[in-house]
């Protein structure tokens, strides 16, 4: 059985949704960020990075959302969460998810995790002021150039969709109105209606 370590409001939701979409047999364990549980000896023994998500599988522990999502898609091919039999198409999925991980998530983190990049309080404030601009630019690019519709990669729902949905839930807090992006707003609405999304959210409360 798979075991997902998560914290509410984090990117771990994407992997949680994907597990539900795949029909996987899994359990979840909540990591309490408010008590700094992510840096406890017990959790650091699972994920030395001190972050979520982490997925315990038969082969060991996986970290990083794009890797976990790819593993879920490849482990449950009947769920058709990625074009695992087409190397180029699968690489396109990975390209999109890598952008969310390496660029969009990092832009968001400058609002809430400024201490990763600076020490001065004035620097934190400057980073926070920049976030609406950087997140807005990221979602403008996704809306205009990367999103194929009706799902991220086109007609087929993939592991890109729960990841985009998860990060889009942060937009309001980042000072960006999702209504500015009609295609992405519609995607967000349709995602919220999916049974797997409702299941994952219920399991995180």
Image (cartoon, rainbow, N blue to C red):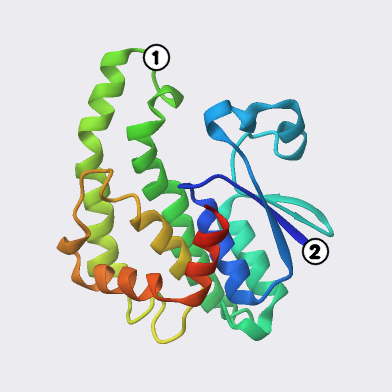
| Quarter of image, res 39 | top right
Report the number of numbered marks.
Answer: 2
Classify 10 Å Cα crowding around label 2: few (below 14), some (14-19), many (20 and above). few
Return the residue found at the far top: 120
Q: Nearer the viewer, residue 153 or 11?
A: 11
The residue under label 1 is: 119
Residue 99 x %, y %: 42, 55
Residue 60 visible here: yes
Q: Residue 178 appears at what percent x and percent y? A: 22, 59
| Res. 159 visible in picture | no
Q: What is the x, y in percent for residue 56?
A: 76, 53
What residue do we see at 25% from left, 49% from top?
172
Looking at the rendered image, the quarter that the N terminus falls into is bottom right
> Which image quadrant for residue 187?
bottom left
Can you identify the residue that label 2 sits on? 1
Q: Secondary structure at mark 1?
A: loop
1 to 47, vertically: above or below: below
Image side of residue 137 versus residue 197, left or right: left
Identify the residue at the far right of this view. Answer: 58
Question: In the image, is 56 to the left or to the right of 5?
Answer: right
The residue nearer to you, when weighing 202 against 186, is 202
- Left or right of 186, for residue 156: right
Q: Is residue 147 left or right of residue 11?
A: left
């Amino acid at each position: 059985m798979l075991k997902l370590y998560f914290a509410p409001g984090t990117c771990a939701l994407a992997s949680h949704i994907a597990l539900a979409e795949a029909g996987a047999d899994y359990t979840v364990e909540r990591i309490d960020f408010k008590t700094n549980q992510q840096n406890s000896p017990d959790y650091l023994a699972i994920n030395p990075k001190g972050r979520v998500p982490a997925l315990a599988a038969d082969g060991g522990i996986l970290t990083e959302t794009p890797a976990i999502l790819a593993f879920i898609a490849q482990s449950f091919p009947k769920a058709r969460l990625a074009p695992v039999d087409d190397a180029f198409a699968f690489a396109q999925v990975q390209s999109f998810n890598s952008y969310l991980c390496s660029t969009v998530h990092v832009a968001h983190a400058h609002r809430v995790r400024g201490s990763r990049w600076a020490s001065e309080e004035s620097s934190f404030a400057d980073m926070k002021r920049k976030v609406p601009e950087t997140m807005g630019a990221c979602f403008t690019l996704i809306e205009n150039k990367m999103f194929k519709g009706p799902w991220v990669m086109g007609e087929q729902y993939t592991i890109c969709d729960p990841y985009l949905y998860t990060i889009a839930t942060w937009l309001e807090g980042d000072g960006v109105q999702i209504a500015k992006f009609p295609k992405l707003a519609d995607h967000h609405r349709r995602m919220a209606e999916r049974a797997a999304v409702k299941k994952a959210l219920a399991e995180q409360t």
